[in-house]
Amino acid sequence: MTNIEGFISTLETEFDELDPGTLRPETKFTDLDEWSSMHSLIIIALIDTEYGVTITGEDLMSISNVEGLYNIVKSRQTH
Amino acid sequence: MAFFSIQDIAVKGIATAVPSNIVSNWDYDLLTESEKKLLVKTTGVEQRRMALPGMTTSDLCFEAGEKLLKDLDWKKEEIDILIFVSQSADYYLPATSIILQDRLGLPKSCMAFDIGLGCSGYVYGLSVIAGMLKATGLKKGLLMVGDISTVTCSKKDKSTYPLFGDAGTVTALEFEENAQPIQFDLSSDGSGKDAIIIPHGGIRNLASPESFVKEQIAPGIVRSKMELALNGLDVFNFSIKEVPSSLKEFLERTETTPHSYDYFVMHQANKLMNETIRKKMGFPPEKVPYSISKYGNTSSASIPLTIVSELSRKLENSEKKLLLAGFGVGLSWGAVSLNLKNVVCPEILEL
């Protein structure tokens, strides 16, 4: 698992309509202007292929920001 | 594990019919321009075929059937079995397959029945008709598979409306000694029944005035209980987890690898989902055809539609080994490995 900066840059590459630097550890996904339910699918697919971790719809509801997502991925990956 | 192999049955032809009415997702007013771009990028669906009121799945299957019988030069009196797989029947009862028997002019000696499955329906249907032909000694059968899904999607539900298209297909199978075995693996998980459901209109929740009330479920999602409800995230997670793991087991059992197949044709559910499965399975892009940008998710019809739309020229006068995977509503999923040899694939009919 990469550090949070690497994780953010992977996310930003996938959300190609986001300018680099838009996402920060404290950024709430749902606060982004561009946010839509499609992004949930993109996040789930990305994390599955890149990190081999399953993120559910409930996970996405429960996390508050980018750092929260990073922590879930990190904790599940080490198991 | 419902893993099995059926010998001596060959697929002889596949035909498809779609409505001529084209609907483009670029014209879908409920979405902003950037949402439309994101929708097309993620789901892959640019345009779809939508039946006009009054057109049924069996109308599409009927025309495809007439065309295929003619191109195969099969006599109607030779057809012993007709199976119709769909979740959009003509009537509550009788079964649509029986109506098709009469309409196609098939003999009364032809057995006909329906199977109610969606995304996995083509794979399941192939297993039932091949199994029947093999077990009974009947010679020729028609598998008619398709759905009109657009009538049961709310136009004001952005989570379903832009995804689905309509299509009807027919696959002709024949008893043929020493045909390459067809291998199947079929699964089901009813605990996921709510992930894709039309809640009212069956016996559990009889249609009542309340069934037709349009409710706002979330912003951009307004529908009644007679219309399709889709939990996209649940379906997505099921598909990228369960499907590749079942398929990997299938490859092990059949002692095959992605190299063993010429093509891997998936149910056309969602481009991002299907691409995730493709990558996890290690299939190169050139072996995995898509028709979803032109036709959307056509439910049970999507696998044969993709074969006809994307592979018909490559299948002419040759033998190709295909891996097919259907997955979705039920939840229900299945894989089949089969050889298509000199298969007749007429051009897609537009009605």
Image: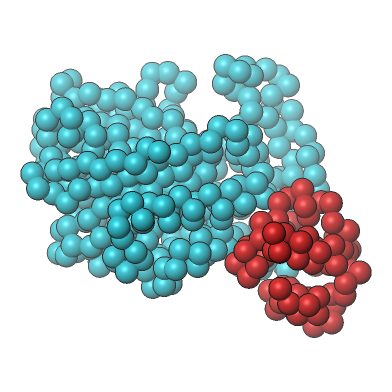
Chain colours: A red, B cyan
Q: Nearer the viewer, residue B188 or B231?
A: B188
Q: Nearer the viewer, residue B298 or B122?
A: B122
State whether residue B336 appears in this view: yes
User: Quarter of the image holding residue B184?
Assistant: top left
Q: Is residue B298 visible?
A: no
Which percent across, then down, holds residue B349?
32, 52
Residue at position x 71%, y 64% from top?
Answer: A78
In the rendered image, the vertical position of residue A19 relative to residue A71, given as above or below: below
Residue B259 at what x, y percent from top left? 32, 69
Q: Quadrant of the N terminus of chain B?
A: top left
Residue A73 in picture, x, y percent from top left: 74, 63
Q: Nearer the viewer, residue B101 or B63?
A: B101
x 14%, y 64%: residue = B317
Return the residue found at the far front: A79
Seen in the image, is B59 located left or right of residue B70?
right
Would residue B318 appear left or right of B1 to someone viewing this image? left
